[in-house]
Image (spheres, rainbow, N blue to C red):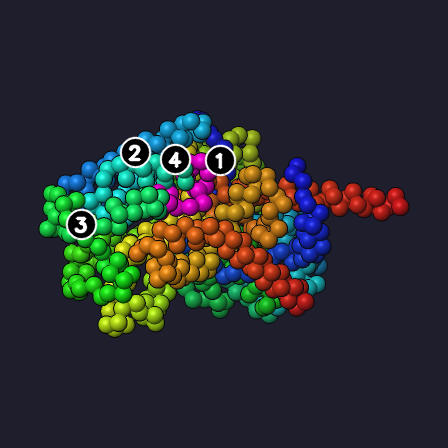
């Protein structure tokens, strides 16, 4: 681990750590417009790929006096954006006095439409889930958020859904980042569209969450579609169902911007957090380009950092130079890597640097605490 | 099936180093056609030799420093094309070769090659030969008249007339089409404007930087004319003489040596405009572009660091505000 200067450490430990707890507050409303490739998955019907024993599985100890939050707990609903249990998020929102419930159908990453398609095709369940969540939390306002830069799509998105306004978010990718400040001002809490649909099913029909909405797309599968997959399926089963091609080189879980690759298809299960599975055929070329300092990464960074310098310092291991670069504010959106003409792994390197720096600071804090306790 | 791991993002934009450098090459070639029309075959020889020398030296240096040789990397081609365009068509071949050797062998590769150099290689190469062969670099053949034998009759350029306080006598149409003595690629204003539009539309360069540079140069030429015949004439001749307009497109926007974020880059361009005019007004040479650029290149790192420092302070203040309201 590289050595930090004392001054640098004090600066970070004294000031940054104190406001890192507010690190969900983002500053700039800025993003890039990406080619979306959402069709044909978005406008096609949602398909069901479910093992018989997982189909419409009812809750075990449902009682008539249960309120919505208890039902969410018993149904085991996981919110797909955060990965936390829905009932915990509902309780948190209730205690915080939330005023507005937002259904997240953003899907700002290319290929993915696993929130937008259910929101449009199962709109009755979504609206029901949204109303239930608002009732449980005590919020008055309701809203559905969709992404504006969807490109050419066949699906018509209206202005409202059963009286609930649909807001189009037009800042480009990453759209969720641009919204954080607005949500904070409105005292809004965001729930994924999938979790709200599962909530409606749990309350009205007493069903457990046994499925997840997944977009299967990319040029490595014969067919792109949104699928409701039961949670006992593996990636291999799902992809083979959609005609996985033999010359596929990369399988990505999640979106094409933030997702991660997997190589063991039959050992990886679908989880409630799996929002997309992409099969890509492009070989990852080694261009052997070096940074020419064009500054495009700095011009697209939604947080307004200077990825160019952070990348260089992290690569050289010169962490003591990072004092003014606020590396801890990086949100790993990957826009810098996307735009880089030298095809460098800028955002991946920045994440590595961030991790190493946090580890170092935490171990240092622990050491200091240990010393205090001894004294 | 052979699956690979890769780090996110899994899609990349179509733009690459190759496309950016390729755009620069495309924008530079029309200037060679124009120079060929004005000065004849000699121009093609200068360009070809310059490119070959730059590429060979670049590949050799990369090989010797045990880095992988990138074939798709067009940057030495761009440097090789830039150098002759900033020199008169009458210049001897060895001058160009020395400029190439200095650019790649002294200014670019010893610092670590592409992206690592502090100074613009092409500019430094030309500045070096300007100091070494002053008369050759600053006397120019007359376009069209000297077709075939560029070195037969050499004259001073409008920049030199301005330096002596005399008003150059060229018509506006001649200035627009480049029919006046000057560096072989830097005179055709119409073609340069076309190149600028091409590069801005392709988003290879940022038009604002060029505007900032030209803006300060225009303001200074308007407020402090060196000639007595009028302020507007001063602006016209200052902007069209020498490599000023050429530099506003190809030198100011050179990515490696300019600051990275947009605000410091605009500041750098605006300040460069002022420094170029200062070098022209009080410097020893008629052309201040090369020396001004080298001077400003040295400050771009400092500008970026100061800008980041300020931005970090602002961010911190905003965070503390947010923390209070939450």
What percent of the width, then of the height, locates residue A200?
Answer: 57, 56
Depicted A203 relative to depicted A234: above or below: below
Measured in 3D between alpha carbons, the distance from the residue under mark 1 to the one under mark 4, in whole angstroms, is 36 Å
Measured in 3D between alpha carbons, the distance from the residue under mark 3 to the one under mark 2, in whole angstroms, is 27 Å
In terms of image quadrants, where is residue A19?
A: bottom right
Q: Is residue A81 magenta?
A: no
Find numbered disc 3 in the image and state the secondary structure of the residue it sits on: strand
Q: Are marks 2 and 4 in contact (CB under 8 Å)?
A: no
Q: Using the rendered image of the protein, determine whether residue A318 is visible from the camera's viewpoint.
A: yes
Q: Using the rendered image of the protein, determine whether residue A278 is visible from the camera's viewpoint.
A: no
Q: Are marks 3 and 2 in contact (CB under 8 Å)?
A: no
Find numbered disc 4 in the image and state the secondary structure of the residue it sits on: helix
Same subunit, labels 3 and 1: the answer reads: yes
Q: Nearer the viewer, residue B177 or A142?
A: B177
Task: Give the residue pinned by disc 1.
Answer: B6
Task: Give the residue pinned by disc 3.
Answer: B154
Q: Residues within 10 Å of mark 4 (few under 14, many from 20)?
A: many
Please name the residue shown 52% across and 53% down the image: B302
- Disc 2 chain ID: B
Measured in 3D between alpha carbons, the distance from the residue under mark 2 to the one under mark 1, in whole angstroms, is 38 Å
Mark number for residue B53?
A: 2
Q: Are marks 3 and 1 in contact (CB under 8 Å)?
A: no
């Amino acid at each position: 681990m590289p050595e930090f200067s004392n001054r640098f450490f004090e600066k970070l430990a004294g000031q940054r750590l104190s406001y890192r707890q507010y690190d969900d507050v983002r500053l700039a409303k800025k993003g890039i417009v990406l080619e979306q490739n959402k069709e044909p998955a978005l406008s096609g019907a949602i398909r069901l790929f479910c093992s018989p024993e997982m189909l419409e599985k009812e809750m075990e100890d449902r009682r008539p006096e249960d309120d919505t939050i208890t039902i969410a707990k018993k149904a085991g609903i996981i919110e797909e954006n955060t990965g936390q249990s829905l009932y915990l998020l509902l309780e948190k929102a209730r205690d915080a006095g939330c005023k507005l419930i937002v259904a997240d159908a953003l899907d700002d990453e290319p290929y993915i439409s696993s929130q937008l398609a259910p929101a449009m095709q199962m709109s009755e369940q979504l609206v029901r889930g949204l109303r239930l969540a608002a009732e449980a939390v005590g919020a008055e306002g309701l809203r559905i958020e969709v992404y504006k830069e969807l490109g050419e799509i066949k699906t018509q998105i209206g202005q409202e859904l059963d009286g609930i306004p649909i807001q189009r978010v037009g800042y480009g990718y990453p759209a969720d980042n641009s919204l954080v400040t607005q949500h904070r001002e409105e005292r809004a809490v965001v729930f994924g569209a999938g979790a709200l649909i599962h909530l409606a099913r749990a309350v009205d029909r007493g069903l457990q969450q046994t499925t997840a909405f997944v977009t299967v797309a990319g040029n490595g599968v014969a067919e792109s579609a949104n699928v409701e997959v039961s949670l006992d399926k593996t990636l291999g089963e799902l992809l083979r169902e959609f005609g996985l091609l033999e010359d596929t080189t990369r399988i990505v879980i999640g979106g094409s911007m933030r997702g991660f690759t997997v190589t063991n298809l039959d050992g990886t299960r679908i989880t409630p957090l799996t929002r997309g599975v992409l099969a890509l055929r492009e070989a990852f070329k080694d261009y052997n380009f070096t940074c020419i300092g064009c500054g495009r990464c700095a011009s697209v960074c939604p947080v307004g950092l200077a990825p160019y310098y952070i990348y260089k310092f992290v690569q050289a291991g010169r962490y003591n130079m990072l004092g003014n670069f606020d590396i801890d504010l990086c949100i790993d959106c990957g826009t810098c890597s996307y735009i880089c003409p030298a095809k460098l792994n800028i955002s991946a390197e920045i994440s590595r640097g961030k991790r190493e720096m946090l580890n170092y600071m935490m171990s240092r804090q622990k050491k200091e605490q240990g010393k205090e306790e001894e004294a | 099936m052979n699956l690979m791991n890769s780090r996110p993002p899994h899609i990349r934009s179509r733009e690459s180093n190759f496309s950016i450098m390729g755009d620069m090459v495309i924008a530079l070639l029309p200037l060679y056609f124009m120079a060929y029309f004005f000065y004849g075959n000699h121009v093609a020889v200068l360009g070809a030799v310059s490119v070959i020398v730059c590429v060979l030296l670049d590949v050799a240096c990369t090989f010797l420093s045990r880095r992988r040789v990138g074939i798709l990397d067009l940057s030495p081609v761009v440097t090789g094309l830039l150098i002759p365009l900033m020199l008169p068509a009458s210049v001897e071949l060895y001058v160009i070769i020395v400029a190439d050797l200095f650019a790649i062998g002294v200014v670019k590769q010893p610092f670590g090659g592409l992206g690592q150099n502090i100074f613009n290689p092409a500019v430094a190469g030309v500045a070096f030969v300007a100091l070494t062969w002053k008369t050759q670099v600053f006397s120019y053949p007359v376009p069209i008249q000297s077709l075939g034998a560029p070195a037969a009759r050499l004259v001073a350029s409008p920049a030199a007339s301005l330096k002596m306080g005399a008003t150059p006598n060229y018509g506006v149409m001649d200035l627009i089409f480049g029919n006046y003595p000057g560096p072989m690629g830097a005179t055709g204003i119409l073609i340069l404007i076309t190149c600028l539009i091409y590069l801005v539309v392709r988003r290879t360069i940022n038009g604002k930087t060029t505007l900032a540079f030209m803006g300060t140069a225009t303001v200074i030429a308007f407020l402090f004319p060196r000639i007595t015949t009028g302020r507007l004439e001063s602006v016209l001749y200052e902007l069209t003489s020498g490599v000023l307009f050429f530099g506003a497109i190809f030198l100011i926007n050179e990515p490696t040596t300019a600051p990275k974020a947009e605000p410091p880059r605009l500041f750098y361009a605006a300040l460069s405009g002022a420094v170029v005019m200062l070098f022209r007004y009080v410097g020893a040479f008629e052309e201040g572009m090369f020396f001004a650029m080298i001077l400003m290149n040295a400050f771009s790192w400092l500008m970026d660091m100061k800008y980041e420092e300020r931005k970090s302070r602002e961010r911190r203040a905003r965070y503390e505000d947010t923390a209070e309201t939450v």
